[in-house]
């Protein structure tokens, strides 16, 4: 959100903002776990950093550049995979063209694991 | 680095680790932490120069002015030296 007192302030730099009322959170589900794809995104961050393609600073930079709209509309790991992907392309792990071909190949398998396994 | 420092009030548009609410504020160096690769370089995949990092202690009165509920409470923040300039003790 634009800070009228300081237009150069970036949206993510929220320290000192008025927090407002604390929302009533639902009781956390003690069995809550991350889904498989979210764990894979987390692993991809660790592997990408270990192989030297980018650092956590690069992850943060792209998350910040994605803007407040992404922060409101995307989940945590949806934002992470978007940032990790951009960092991996910038770092030379693969090209946008490589990614497009791979996404098309995987989409062609079908919507579910069942669809995919029914094909040879 | 002098004991009392002011956080530079710079407003670059890129990735930095210095929060806005501390820019322009005066604190004292609580300890120096050594040199670390500059995250402002790392964020863009550039070779990173090692920069001295300091833990700086601010009073709530300095940060929030008259809004501070407990003016003598303190807040520590770790800030790279290139964001700090000498300040006169007041």
Image (tube, coloured by chain):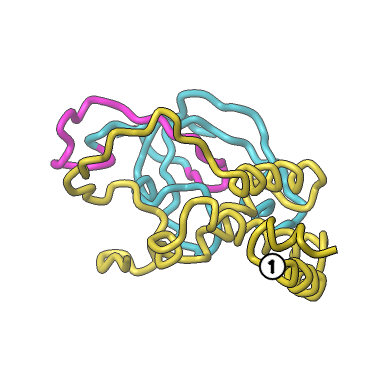
Q: Position of residue A39 (x, y in %)?
A: 62, 42
| Residue B82 locus on image (x, y percent) | 57, 47
Q: Write the residue at 74% across / 72% down.
A: A108
Toward which corner of the image does residue B88 lie, by quadrant?
A: top left
Residue situated furthest front in the rendering: A118
Q: Residue at x 74, y 59 (%)?
A: A88
Residue behind mark 1:
A110
Is B75 magenta? The answer is yes
* B26 to the left or right of A98: left
Q: Quadrant of residue A32?
A: top left
Q: Quadrant of residue B57?
A: top left
Q: Work out which residue is located at the far right of the displayed protein and give it.
A: A120
Nearer the observer, A79 or A115: A115
Residue extent of the magenta highlight = B62-85
Residue depicted at 27% across the width and 39% down the height: A26
Q: Quadrant of the C terminus of chain B?
A: top left
User: Quick check: A104 left or right of B16?
Assistant: right
Colour chosen for chain A = yellow
Q: As drawn, is B83 to the left or to the right of B68?
A: right
Which chain contains the residue that carries disc 1?
A
Does residue A95 belong to the magenta stretch? no
- Seen in the picture, residue B28 relative to A52 is either above or below; the reply is above
Q: In the image, is residue A67 above or below residue A34? A: below
Q: Position of residue B85 (x, y in %)?
A: 48, 45
Residue under the point 41% across and 63% down: A73
Q: Neighbour class for label 1 at 10 Å: few (<14), some, many (≥20)?
A: some
Looking at this view, is A90 or A25 the one in front?
A25
Q: Quick one: which chain is cyan? A: B
**Left or right for A2, reference A76:** left
Residue A84 vertical placement versus B26 (above, below): below
Task: Out of A7 and A90, give the one closest to the viewer.
Answer: A90
For the residue labelled by badge 1, is the local secondary structure a helix, a strand or a loop?
loop
């Amino acid at each position: 959100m634009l800070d009228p007192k300081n237009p150069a302030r970036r949206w993510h730099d929220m320290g000192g903002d008025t927090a407002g009322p604390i929302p009533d959170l639902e009781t956390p589900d003690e069995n809550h776990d991350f889904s498989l794809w979210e764990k894979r995104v987390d692993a991809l961050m660790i592997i990408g950093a270990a192989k030297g393609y980018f650092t956590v600073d690069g992850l943060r930079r792209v998350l910040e550049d994605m803007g407040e709209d992404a922060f409101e509309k995307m989940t945590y790991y949806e934002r992470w995979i978007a940032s990790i992907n951009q960092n991996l392309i910038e770092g030379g792990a693969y090209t946008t063209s490589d990614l497009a071909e791979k996404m098309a190949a995987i989409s062609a398998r079908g919507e579910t694991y069942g669809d995919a396994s029914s094909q040879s | 680095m002098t004991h009392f420092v002011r956080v530079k009030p710079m407003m670059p548009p890129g990735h930095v680790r210095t929060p806005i609410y501390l820019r322009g504020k005066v604190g004292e160096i609580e300890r120096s932490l050594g040199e670390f690769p500059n995250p402002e370089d790392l964020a863009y995949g550039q070779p990173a120069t090692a920069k001295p990092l300091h833990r700086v202690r601010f009073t709530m009165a300095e940060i929030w002015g008259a809004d501070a509920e407990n003016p003598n409470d303190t807040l520590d923040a770790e800030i790279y030296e290139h964001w700090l300039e000498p300040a006169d003790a007041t």
